[in-house]
Amino acid sequence: MSARYLTSEQDAQLRRWERWNRNYFVFAFVALIVVLVFSSQLGLSSGDDWGSLGVLLALLVAPIVVLQLRLRCPACGVKIGWQAKLMAPDQCKSCGVFLRSKNSSS
Ligand SMILES: [Zn+2]
């Protein structure tokens, strides 16, 4: 049983996705807090009309879902987005490849 790793190129691809994913997550989190804090001032949650606030929240969350769906195993192409949370998983459950390059220190 020889452990398989990604090439450094595939690894770079994955790290790029992680960076995007993490950056957007932080952005969405901050935006979410700002929206919640200022929603009353902005008149978004005035009365029991939460419609516009709901749309705003959906708009913030949707790209996270898209990012998750876009992540594929570089080796076998199976979608691994749902195994990932903020970071890519250590190993592809489908083909067993380790989702990092052999030389990477992390
Ligand atoms: Zn795979």
Image (cartoon, rainbow, N blue to C red):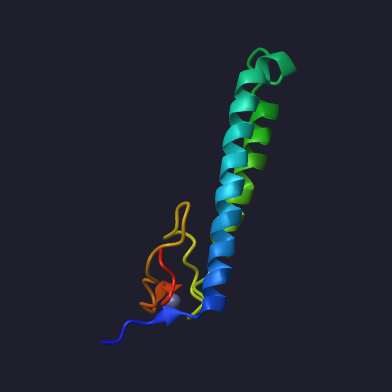
**Which residue is drawn at the image coordinates 42% and 60% (left, top)?**
83
Q: Residue furthest right?
A: 42
Which of 54 and 66 lies nearest the eye of the viewer? Answer: 66
**In the image, is residue 99 above or below residue 42?**
below
> Quadrant where the C terminus lies?
bottom left
10 vs 51, left or right, is left
**Which residue is drawn at the image coordinates 67% and 15% (left, top)?**
40
List x then y, in percent, for residue 53. 66, 28
Q: Residue furthest left?
A: 1
- Please tell me in which quadrant of the rendered image residue 69 appears: bottom right
Judge whether residue 45 can be spotted in this image: no
Which of 38 and 50 lies nearest the eye of the viewer? Answer: 38
**Which residue is drawn at the image coordinates 36% and 71% (left, top)?**
93
Judge whether residue 78 can be spotted in this image: yes
**Which residue is drawn at the image coordinates 59% and 63% (left, top)?**
16
List x then y, in percent, for residue 20. 61, 55
Image quarter where ligand 1 lies: bottom left
List x then y, in percent, for residue 4. 37, 82
**In the image, is residue 2 above or below residue 82?**
below
